[in-house]
Image: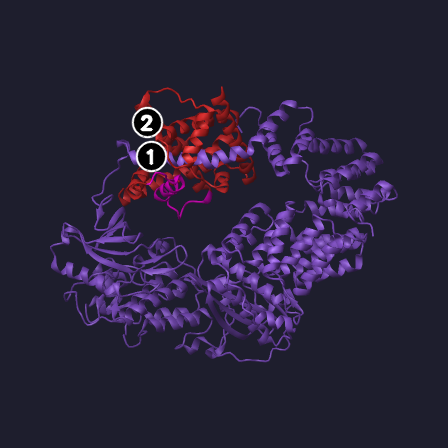
């Protein structure tokens, strides 16, 4: 930072932040302590803190609006300097349209973005080029376009609103303004993923089928005429050449449209029907998959020759991973023989769906009866392919353990990705509640299989489960569809496969439905409560609130952001019990008791059997109340509601360990590990239990395993150091401690290097004085003083630990480090304060 | 702007943003006028759109300029943040220059002096959505002067305010543009607001 005294500036920022985080009545005392003898600093901070509230009001209500207002005035006045290169239409008002900006222009006319002042919506206005105004045929074609296409109403067709004429007699069409990117632009960046290509192709086919049903053939299907919105919705635009079936608009021999995507019959200018669009659809799909057009030529003539006579290079020659069924589908769209080509867009659609669901295309039995595996793309859809498209139902009584693999999405966009993640979580959660299953793998252990190439047998073996659940999720506007397959892991056989669809607001019910179907399929024994919960409809949830909730879940660990997301979710949907429950946890972590209490109460009021709410309650009672029995009861309640809740088992394990009940603790941590074997948190959890239960060799064994799972191993080395330290193996302890960035001055005291111990004391104390203390600072000071034999100081810092409500106080009863102090009344007083005396 | 011109501008802007990201501070000097021009163009277009509306969302302006000038398929999140920061600076210049012109037109070029009462009045008036726009120009110039003083004390806080105020940037965007953590931006922003306020208050009391 290029300012004078950057260090001091940073310090002011931190102290200011820390002071404001405290309740108002505690701020002054904090500043006195933190500023020490620096009176000037204290005056500055006192004044800053006292103005904080007014200042924020000032910024929100005066300064911010002043900027917006200035920008507004700027426009009102519009000084000459603001005038900008003019376009004849931009800024004009035509009929009831205010023209905003030019979007582009094609052979068939200029396109502008405009505001429809009557209906207050944004539209695209397409003008017939003035020089064509005199051309009667162009005029007729243009009017025809509007009439034909305005009859079409389909989510994959860009709607035509109206046709009009300017005062000067110029014709225009007003159509829906579709924000997004053309497929042409997308392909220009390279071939699309197979799942995206399938998804877009299916949507185009749906739109085309709707048009064909209305007797309209597009006749100019090409990537430039397909818009993809940010949400992955496809809109076919520019039915500019569409014709009413039976009416021939084009003069014989006139070819219009882009030659590259034309069907052979179109190049001959003869009787066109829906099948010409099927051809073009095939050409578009070909290009999405390979990045190349199927036919090429130096000139229109050679291109037309190629279209009529050549076979395109097979798509699998470009990308061998393309499923055979899909390659066959492309070939059949591009069959020059009209009779052998798909006759209708919805036939293409049916085979696309079959491909997506991993079945062979209907007319290509040769591709079935094989078990195929695909790599990076949509691996899970295709994991298993069974003969004939019919699945044998087998009794599945042997399945007692399950893993839900991360859901895949059809489109590659990130909003869909996190939505799919959220869906996976919810389903795991619903399935975890079934006590009849022995084992349901939790989230962290399945994420590693996202997009995996491993076989189901291998995954099953690694996770120790009998069956896998594969999901694919498609969110289209207000509807959600989930395809679910249940796979016997060892046999690599699909046991069952089904699609579920519901409106977005019923997404929680949808998940229950899926869980119920799986339970039924596996013949899981349900308790009456479980059965009742599964058939009961979940309350509807506002989709926006749900999206915010999922974002909150994703920022797990970043408490402030999580609070913001969950709060917004509950604002959007005040009946969203789960969001309240999740909101409570970060509130606990940042020491906001009242807010946490409120959120939990609300969650339980909305759903008294919500296990997440009891998780949060347990954490609250533990960390903020030190009410051990209440915390334990809440966690046990959560486990009662959700027996496979690994987080609750882990928290309970830690809790009973801190109360000195080692066997219980080990059992709970093992239970957490059982459901989530790849979780670093639980692996470290069981290791810590061994450490504080003084089973040091076992602790080391478990910490060694933790090293494989974490990215930052500093904390693990500190624990390993501790495990040697308490056995008196100081040299080994030192070697471990030296690999951490954390304080470990007690080892120096133990090996007689007192100077080094004192240096760490000084630096920790400086940290404390600066107001930079974290929840370990006082605790570490107490540890070093204990090892130096300075009991008075050790107690002072332990007392500060509990005054600050640093988390570490909860370890007082079991921590080996303080054994030398245990006999003293001051220690008993401390234990009493943390409510750890029995 | 024709399509080709837009593409050429996009290429240039993207190149400059990449240079900025590599730490080439001089790129900002070349970038600035481009962004400045585009913002004025956007403002002009906005004027067509927002007839009669007396407030304008600067965030929307800045983002529209971004969409126009940057090829999204090539821009990283950091690139975007750098662009927004440059646009925030440009927006500040445009608004301050314009406010200065206005005041000069209306009553010569005296620097504005706000009494505390006036400041309070202004608060009342502005909340009531009325008040002559000259007052607003004064307030904006006073803010800018305070911001310049803040920049001398703490350059980073100055930039944070610029990004947040004039570019409507989020904490995350600001952090990416300045190459610091979001926690740093949050801290700086919290403190800078109070300093600006105190500075303005001290000014009118002096």
- Quadrant holding the N terminus of chain A: top right
Which colour denotes chain B? red
Name the residue carrying label 2. B102
Mark 2 Cα shell of 10 Å, populated few (<14), some (14-19), many (≥20): some
Q: Considering only vertical position in the picture, is A699 above or below B195?
A: below
Mark 1 Cα shell of 10 Å, populated few (<14), some (14-19), many (≥20): many
Image position, residue A456 (x, y; %): 57, 68
Image position, residue A238 (x, y; %): 26, 59
Using residue A690 as the reference point, say whether residue A646 is left or right of it. Answer: left
Residue at 63% across / 78% down in the picture? Answer: A397
Q: Evaluate whether label 2 is on the same chain as label 1.
A: no
Q: Report if residue B74 lies within the magenta region.
A: yes
Labels 2 and 1 touching (C-beta < 8 A): yes
Using residue A216 as the reference point, say whether residue A27 is left or right of it. Answer: right
Extent of the magenta region:
B53-77
Q: Report if residue A261 lies within the magenta region.
A: no
A45 vs A169, nearest the viewer: A45
Residue A677 quadrant: bottom right
Residue at 41% across / 33% down in the picture? Answer: B125
**To which chain does the residue with label 2 belong?**
B
Q: Considering only vertical position in the picture, is A635 above or below A779?
A: below
Image position, residue A265 (x, y; %): 23, 70
Name the residue carrying label 1. A73
Which colour denotes chain A? purple
- Dot 2 falls on a residue whose secondary structure is helix
**To which chain does the residue with label 1 belong?**
A
Residue B140 quadrant: top left
Image position, residue A586 (x, y; %): 61, 49
- Asked whether residue A751 appears in the rendered view, the answer is no
């Amino acid at each position: 930072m290029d300012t004078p005294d950057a260090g001091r500036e940073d310090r002011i920022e931190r102290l200011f932040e820390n002071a404001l985080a405290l309740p108002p009545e505690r701020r002054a005392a904090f500043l006195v302590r933190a500023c020490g003898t620096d009176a000037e600093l204290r005056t500055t901070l006192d004044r800053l803190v006292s103005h904080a509230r007014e200042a924020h009001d000032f910024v929100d209500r005066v300064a911010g609006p002043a900027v917006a207002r200035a920008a507004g005035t700027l426009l009102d006045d519009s000084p000459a300097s603001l005038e900008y290169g003019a376009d004849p239409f931009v800024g004009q008002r035509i009929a009831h349209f205010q023209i905003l900006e030019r979007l582009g222009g094609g052979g068939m006319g200029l396109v502008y973005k405009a505001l429809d002042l009557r209906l207050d919506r944004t539209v695209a206005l397409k003008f017939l080029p003035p020089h064509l105004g005199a051309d009667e045929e162009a005029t007729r074609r243009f009017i025809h376009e509007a009439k034909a296409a305005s009859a079409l109403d389909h989510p994959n067709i860009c709607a035509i609103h109206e046709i009009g004429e300017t005062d000067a007699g110029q014709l225009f069409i007003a159509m829906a303004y579709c924000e997004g990117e053309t497929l042409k632009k997308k392909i220009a960046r390279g071939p699309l993923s197979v799942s995206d290509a399938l998804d877009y192709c299916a949507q185009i086919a749906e739109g085309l089928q709707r048009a064909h049903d209305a007797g309209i053939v597009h006749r100019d299907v090409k990537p430039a005429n397909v818009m993809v919105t940010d949400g992955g919705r496809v809109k076919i635009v520019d039915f500019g050449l569409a014709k009413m079936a039976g009416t021939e608009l084009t003069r014989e021999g006139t070819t219009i449209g882009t030659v590259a995507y034309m069907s052979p019959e179109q190049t001959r200018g003869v009787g066109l029907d829906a099948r010409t669009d099927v051809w073009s659809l095939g050409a578009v799909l070909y290009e999405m998959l390979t990045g190349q057009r199927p036919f090429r030529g130096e000139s229109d003539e050679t291109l037309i020759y190629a279209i009529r006579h050549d076979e395109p290079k097979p798509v699998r020659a470009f990308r061998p991973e393309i499923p055979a069924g899909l390659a066959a589908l492309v070939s059949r769209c591009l069959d020059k023989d009209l009779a052998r080509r798909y006759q209708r867009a919805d036939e293409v659609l049916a085979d696309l769906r079959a491909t997506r669901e991993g079945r062979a295309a209907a007319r290509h039995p040769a591709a079935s009866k094989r078990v195929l595996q695909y790599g990076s793309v949509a691996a899970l859809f295709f994991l298993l392919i069974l003969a004939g498209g019919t699945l044998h139902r087998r009794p599945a009584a042997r399945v007692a353990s399950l893993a839900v693999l991360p859901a895949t999405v059809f489109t590659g966009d990130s909003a869909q990705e996190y939505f799919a993640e959220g869906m996976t979580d919810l389903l795991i959660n619903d399935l975890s509640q079934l006590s009849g299953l022995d084992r349901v793998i939790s989230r962290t252990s399945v994420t590693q299989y996202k997009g995996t190439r491993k076989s189901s047998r291998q995954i099953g073996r690694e996770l120790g489960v009998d069956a896998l659940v594969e999901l694919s999720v498609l969110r289209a506007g207000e509807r959600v569809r989930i395809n679910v397959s249940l796979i016997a892991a060892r046999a690599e056989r699909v046991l069952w496969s089904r699609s579920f669809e519901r409106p977005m607001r019923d997404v929680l019910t949808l998940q229950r439905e899926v869980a119920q179907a799986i339970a039924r399929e596996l013949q899981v024994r349900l308790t009456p409560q479980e059965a009742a919960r599964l058939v009961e409809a979940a309350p509807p949830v506002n989709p926006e609130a749900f999206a915010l909730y999922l974002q909150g879940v994703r920022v797990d660990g970043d408490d402030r952001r999580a609070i913001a997301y969950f709060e917004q979710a509950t604002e959007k949907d005040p009946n969203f019990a789960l969001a309240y429950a999740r909101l409570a946890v970060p509130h606990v972590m940042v020491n906001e008791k009242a807010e946490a209490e409120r959120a939990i109460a609300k969650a339980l009021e909305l759903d008294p059997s919500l296990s997440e709410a009891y998780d949060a309650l347990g954490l609250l009672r533990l960390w903020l109340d030190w009410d051990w029995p209440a915390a334990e009861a809440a966690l046990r309640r959560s486990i009662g509601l959700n027996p496979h809740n690994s987080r609750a088992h882990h928290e309970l394990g830690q809790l009973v360990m801190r109360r000195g009940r080692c066997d219980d603790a080990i059992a709970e941590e093992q239970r957490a590990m059982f459901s989530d074997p790849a979780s670093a948190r639980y692996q470290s959890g069981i290791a810590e239990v061994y450490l504080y239960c003084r089973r040091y060799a076992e602790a080391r064994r478990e910490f060694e395993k933790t090293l494989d799972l974490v990215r930052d191993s500093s904390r693990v080395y500190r624990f390993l150091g501790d495990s040697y330290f308490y056995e008196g193996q100081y040299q080994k302890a030192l070697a471990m401690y030296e690999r951490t960035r954390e304080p470990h001055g007690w080892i120096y005291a133990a090996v007689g290097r007192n100077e080094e111990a004192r240096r760490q004391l000084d630096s920790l104390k400086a940290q404390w004085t600066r107001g930079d203390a974290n929840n370990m600072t006082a605790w570490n000071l107490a540890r070093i003083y204990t090892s130096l034999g300075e009991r008075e100081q050790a107690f002072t810092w332990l007392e500060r630990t509990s005054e600050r409500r640093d988390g570490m106080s909860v370890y007082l009863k079991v921590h080996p480090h303080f054994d030398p102090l245990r006999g003293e009344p001051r220690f008993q007083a401390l234990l009493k304060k943390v409510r750890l005396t029995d | 702007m024709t399509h080709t011109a837009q593409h050429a501008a996009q290429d240039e802007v993207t190149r400059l943003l990449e240079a900025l990201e590599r730490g080439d501070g001089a790129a900002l000097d070349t970038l600035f006028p481009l962004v400045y021009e585009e913002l004025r163009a956007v403002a002009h277009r906005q004027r067509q759109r927002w007839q009669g509306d007396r407030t304008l969302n600067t965030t929307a302006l800045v983002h529209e300029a971004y969409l126009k000038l940057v090829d999204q398929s090539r821009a990283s999140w950091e690139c975007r943040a750098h662009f927004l920061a440059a646009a925030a600076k440009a927006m500040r210049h445009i608004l301050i220059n314009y406010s200065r012109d206005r005041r000069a037109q209306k009553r010569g070029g005296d620097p504005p002096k706000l009494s505390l009462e006036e400041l309070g009045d202004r608060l009342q008036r502005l909340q009531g959505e009325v008040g002559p726009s000259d007052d607003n120009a004064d307030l904006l110039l006073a803010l800018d002067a305070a911001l310049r003083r803040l920049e001398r004390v703490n350059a980073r806080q100055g930039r944070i305010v610029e990004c947040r105020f004039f570019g409507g940037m989020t904490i995350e965007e600001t952090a990416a543009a300045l190459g610091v953590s979001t926690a740093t931006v949050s801290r700086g922003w919290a403190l800078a607001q109070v300093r600006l306020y105190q500075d303005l208050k001290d000014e009118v009391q002096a």
